Image (cartoon, rainbow, N blue to C red):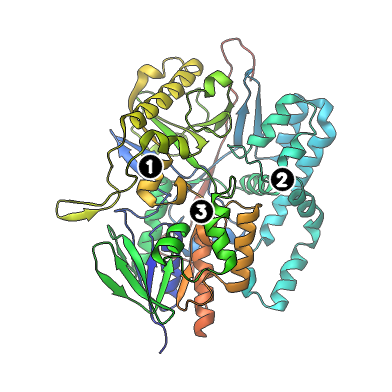
Amino acid sequence: MPRESMIIIGGGLGGLSTGCYGQMNGYRTQIFEMHELPGGCCTAWDRGGFTFDCCISWLLGNGPGNEMHQIWLELGALQGKQMRHFDTFNIVRARDGRAVYFYSDPDRLQAHLLALSPADAKLIRDFCDGLRKFRKCLAVYPFLTPVGLMGRVERWRMLASFIPYFNVIRKSITVLMADYSARFTDPLLREAFNFILYERHPAFPVLPFYFQLASHANLSAGVPEGGSLGLARSIEQRYLRLGGTITYDAKVERVLVENDRAVGVRLCDGREFRSDIVVSACDGHTTMMKFLGGRYLTEDYRRLYTETITEPGMVFPGYVTVFLGLRRPFPDGEPCTTHLLTDAEAADLIGIRHQSINVQFRSMHYPELSPDETTVVYATYFCDIAPWRALNDGQEQRSRVRKGQEKHTLPVRRALDYYAGKRRVREAILRFLEQRYPGLRESVATRDISTPLTQVRYTGNYDGTVLGWQPFVDSGETLEKLVKKHGPGLPGLANFYQSGVWATTGGLIRAAAAGRHVMQFVCRDDGRPFTASVDRNAPPPTHVVIPVGRRIPREGVFT
């Protein structure tokens, strides 16, 4: 019998994208999401008149000239919105107060870096020249079709399009940024280059740094009006207009299997739902080890989900995030700055991976998410979950009934040490910010803090990760090989597929593209031509560039 119905587990961007493309291709889809909101990690929440947006600092593909942009337009994510682009991607401030402005424009960036360190002129010109070439390369970077489904001619055509950029790709993918930056003679540049992408990524080569900066320079890595939850809501509405069904407060407990075929799901309340196809777009470890009970894992998948996943650096870490709603504007605030910390400044930041915090005055990104004449501050750092688990030593997730409806993401009772740890971190961040922005502490109207355990409660993600598998290391490379070999399914289990960040390697555009890709595999398996169309329900997005001016501190010296 032809396959017609599909159940999708998870209403994050991967699940919503899968649902949209499923509906576009004639499948009858239903999404089950354990939270009461769409978006998964792409979310926000309200506190005291402020909306705290905890996800999008930049959105790859939010501008034209690349295949990423088409995916967002097909999903209806950007239409009718203003896309905001800062002329500086990030500022890295050293412990001595010196700063590096990573401007979007390569020429401006080169001039700034040369002024900071004339002795590093050769390496600075080499980096900026590579960035200029990568800006052109983005136009041919493939996102619409997975490599595993490309025919021989299409694959050769793709490879031919990369020939003009072969050298810059080869050089940037074979050299770690840690090694590249070590060539600078200036200590500030030597350290700052590692924090271009807000946090330090020890396993990243130069290539992803080029990719993000080039996208930003091409006005295709800004932020969308309405923020993270607004983006998720837009895709949810696109899905509903296409005829899809989404059920919230519905936590899946098991994938039903009969005769080595996925036939539906069982919810935690015992209800069962049947379908011809099951797609899991939620946490990969939960899917493999709980929903499927560890069955159908080849040796490679077994090693990936039982051994590799536990090794350091194989999965993106979680975040600690401190939000502050301030009663007044702070005109000296910068949209995005990574501050390098001293030992003393980092001492109270529980679980911190690298001695830095990223601080964003988010009212510049999303003025519509806070009252007039106020400010939202967003301060984050990469964080291990183990110290927070040691402080909590209790439940991480719990389902209970509220007003006759079973809820799965409500607060759980934590240990007193856990709450004390959150206060300690919040106080450390406030102390740090008060030194740089006098009067900030007394302006706090409301505040909140999330940890990796918060992420576990809301999404069930392994160890509170937001992005799943790390690229450029054994875990991400193994997954890519397995998907190329088997597709986004499991050998031996029919009618089952994976989508979202656990079927690829990290990032919102990757999650959205995974939904498109999995439906291309489903259509191939069913002998159907794949189809997709741009959402015409609202006008195209508009774009604005916001300059980030240098500020003059009290000493009268430019930083």
Whether residues under marks 1 and 2 lie with C-beta atoms below 8 angstroms apart, the answer is no
Q: Earlier in the sequence, mark 3 or mark 1?
A: 1
> Which one is closest to the eye, mark 3 or mark 1?
1
Please provide percent x and percent y for residue 252: 33, 63
Q: In the rendered view, does 363 fall on the left or right side of 90? A: left
Q: Earlier in the sequence, mark 2 or mark 3?
A: 2
> Which one is closest to the eye, mark 1 or mark 2?
1
Kindly identify the amino acid type of the residue bearing the numbered disc 3: Leu
Q: Earlier in the sequence, mark 1 or mark 2?
A: 2
Residue 179's quadrant in the figure? top right
Please name the residue shown 46% across and 51% down the image. Answer: 462
- Residue located beneath label 3 in the image: 508
Q: Secondary structure at mark 3?
A: helix
Kindly identify the amino acid type of the residue bearing the numbered disc 1: Thr
- Residue located beneath label 2 in the image: 206
Please provide percent x and percent y for residue 486: 58, 73
Please provide percent x and percent y for residue 388: 42, 36
Kindly identify the amino acid type of the residue bearing the numbered disc 2: Val
Asked if residue 432 is positioned above or below residue 555 in the image, the reply reads below
Question: Quadrant where the N terminus lies?
Answer: bottom left
Q: CA distance from mark 2 to mark 3?
A: 20 Å
Q: Nearer the viewer, residue 236 or 108?
A: 236
> Furthest-bottom residue in view?
1
Please provide percent x and percent y for residue 445: 32, 25
Q: Secondary structure at mark 2?
A: loop
- Residue located beneath label 1 in the image: 454
Q: Is residue 61 at all visible to an observer of this figure?
A: no
